[in-house]
Image: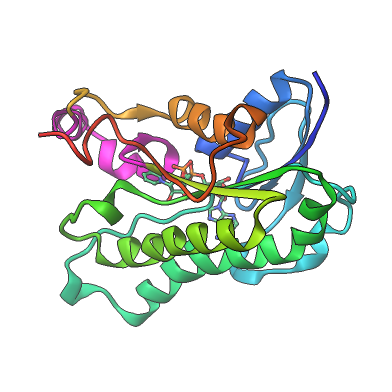
Amino acid sequence: MVSNNYLIIGGSSGIGYEIAQLLLKENHKVWITGNTSESTPLGAIRLQLDIQNYNPQVFDSLPDTLHGIAYCPGTIQLKPFRALKEEDFKKDMEINVWGAVKTLQDNLKRLKQATSASVVLFSTVAVQTGMSFHSSVAASKGAIEGLTRSLAAELAPSIRVNAVAPSLTDTALASALLSTPEKREASAKRHPLQRVASAEEIAQVAHFLLSEKSNWVTGQIWKADGGMGNLK
Ligand SMILES: NC(=O)c1ccc[n+]([C@@H]2O[C@H](COP(=O)([O-])OP(=O)(O)OC[C@H]3O[C@@H](n4cnc5c(N)ncnc54)[C@H](OP(=O)(O)O)[C@@H]3O)[C@@H](O)[C@H]2O)c1
């Protein structure tokens, strides 16, 4: 198998970490960014990146060609609408959307160098399915869905752009929602498949979208939600 170059923004934990692992198993070269965690999948090269103190020089050491980028940083600020402050909305927009925009703009030339490249962004089930207390995160992830379709049109045919829309997934980001057996059971029951996802299960979908196996797929929002979004 050919060895490609991949950049995983937010590859130091959760879904991004698992995506990096899957790519490394196939002998691809993988660069990850981490922010607060030093954790790095074995064989990956770690770059330090805080989206809220963004510095494009972090990418200076990357090769001229990238075959794929996954943008994995995210937020879960679940509050009643009346309690959400301007800073909450700004933080969600900054981490979920603006970080994706900046990292893609700063690496576009590298993606264009590949004959065929793939970008994977992350939305949430809470965009297509209305959920209480999700207004801020849903607004920012809704922007990601628009960005996905628009970029897929603009960057075709050389770069494919898709997003994964997970429901609750067992990662550090969701730890407060899964911190007791009662919470875990209640979350599981909301899914037709009667459990929450593992980080690896969501990473498998992202990995497929990054790979050549999905060469005919672009501009899609790929639901990975145990049926929650469209089954009763
Ligand atoms: N988990 C869920 O239930 C769930 C549900 C729906 C959608 N999603 C989406 O799926 C994606 C992956 O989520 P996850 O659960 O894997 O999250 P996670 O475990 O918290 O991992 C997020 C990754 O992004 C990095 N990151 C977070 N904030 C950052 C910042 N401000 N600057 C730079 N890097 C930052 C983290 O780095 P450090 O750890 O080094 O700080 C980590 O590597 C997110 O976009 C999320 O919105 C998740």
Residue 222 falls in image quadrant: top left
Give the farthest residue toward the left: 232
Counting every numbered tag in the picture gives 0
Residue 68 falls in image quadrant: top right
Q: Please tell me which residue is depicted at 37% across the width and 62% down the height of the picture.
A: 142
On the picture, is 60 further left or further right than 220?
right
Q: Does the magenta stretch include residue 189?
A: yes
Q: Which colour scheme is used?
A: rainbow
Q: In this view, does 80 lie above or below 193?
A: below
On the picture, is 109 further left or further right than 95?
right
Q: Please tell me which residue is depicted at 81% across the width and 57% down the height of the picture.
A: 59
Which percent across, then down, holds residue 148?
51, 57
On the picture, is 222 further left or further right than 52?
left
Q: Is residue 50 magenta?
A: no
Give whichever of 56, 87 is nearer the camera.
56
* Quadrant including the C terminus: top left
* Magenta-colored span: 166-191
The overriding secondary structure of the stretch rendered in magenta is helix
Residue 77 falls in image quadrant: bottom left
Which percent across, then down, holds residue 204?
51, 26
Q: Please tell me which residue is depicted at 82% across the width and 65% down the height of the picture.
A: 57
Which percent across, then down, holds residue 190?
15, 34
Q: Please tell me which residue is depicted at 44% across the width and 63% down the height of the picture.
A: 146
Which percent across, then down, holds residue 227?
24, 32
Q: Is residue 102 above or below residue 165?
A: below
